[in-house]
Amino acid sequence: MTTIDTALPQTPPTIRREALYFALRNGKLLLGLGVIVVLLLTAIFGPILVTGTPNDYIGPPMRPPSSKYWFGTNTFGQDIFIQFVYGLRTTFEVGVLGGGIAAIIGMLVGFVAGYRGGLIDEVLNMITNIVLVIPTLAVLLIINAYLGIRSVAVQGLFIGLTSWPWAARAIRAQTFSLRTREFVDLARLSGVRTGKIIRREIAPNMSSYLFMTFILLFGGSILIASSLDFIGLGPTEGVSLGLMLQNAHQWSALHLGLWWWFVPPGAGITAIVGALYVANVGLDEVFNPKLRET
């Protein structure tokens, strides 16, 4: 996984105001966040506003998009738009859960290993390297295949437990460079405990870096979950964008010419991950003065 190349800003009010100034003028960041906000609002309020559930048979089968059925119906007469808004919610849920768990583990391991060093660093680095070389997708395939009931929570948990090593290594490297700074030495000489030094001195100076790391973990979790869903190892209950693609493939939507069955979920996944990437590039330009000047 490619690490993030960005400067580590300090966090006084003047620096925050400067970052906000450039953020509001960065087209990539505004575009990416705009797409994410629109899709997120659709995921939150869409299921509340639509009538029926994703599995209801509400109309004639294989109808193209119309004013009544916005995204058309599938071969079973199910409304694809209803499935899409529910699928968006599930996709965001697994992204937040998987990315959040991976970010928490990566931060804990990276901060402790980078700050403490010595034997603790060697042990944590060894564990990180072991998890890093494990074929993540193969492990997830085996685990999901043998689970009787697969849920979004379980899927997000396993994705998070296997996606953190690259983030831990990146955070460890940044912590190494910060632990020798004067303000950290001053806090250490003042008798401040390790946990408080990490929370109050090191982490705030890596806030932009940590946020960008979470964005990448969030997008990666969505892609892994969609891959599992597409091959039939997604949640056994509910619907997701990946499961919609899997159903469209299983029931020959492409051969039947039902483009409205597979295009919306594919476009939804692409829009989420693409918008996250564009927003991440925009953030990099905001927080990195060298990129900001180009």
Image (cartoon, rainbow, N blue to C red):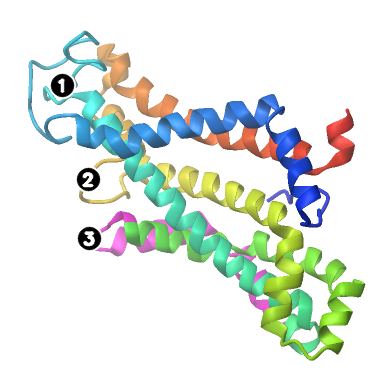
114 relative to 65, above or below: below
Looking at the picture, which amino acid does disc 1 mark? Thr
**202 relative to 69 in the view: left or right:** right
Looking at the picture, which amino acid does disc 2 mark? Gly
Query: Which mark is nearer the camera, 1 or 2?
Result: 2
Disc 1 or 2, which lies upstream in sequence? 1
185 relative to 221, above or below: below
Q: Secondary structure at mark 2?
A: loop
Q: Locate residue 108: give its quadrant.
A: bottom right
Q: Is residue 125 visible?
A: no
Q: CA distance from mark 1 to mark 3?
A: 26 Å
Counting from the top left corner in percent of width and height, residue 189 is at 86, 88
Q: Nearer the viewer, residue 277 or 244?
A: 277
Disc 1 or 3, which lies upstream in sequence? 1
For mark 3, what is the residue? 149
Q: Which is the main secondary structure of the residues drawn in magenta?
A: helix
Counting from the top left corner in percent of width and height, residue 63 is at 17, 11
Q: Nearer the viewer, residue 173 or 50?
A: 50
For mark 2, what is the residue? 238
Query: Which mark is nearer the camera, 2 or 3?
Result: 2
Counting from the top left corner in percent of width and height, residue 233 is at 32, 50
Q: Is residue 165 visible?
A: yes
Q: Which residues are magenta?
A: 123-152
Residue 75 numbered mark, or none: 1
206 relative to 191, above or below: above
Q: Quadrant of the C terminus?
A: top right
Q: Nearer the viewer, residue 205 or 275?
A: 205
**18 relative to 267 in the view: left or right:** right
Looking at the picture, which amino acid does disc 3 mark? Ile
Q: Secondary structure at mark 1?
A: loop
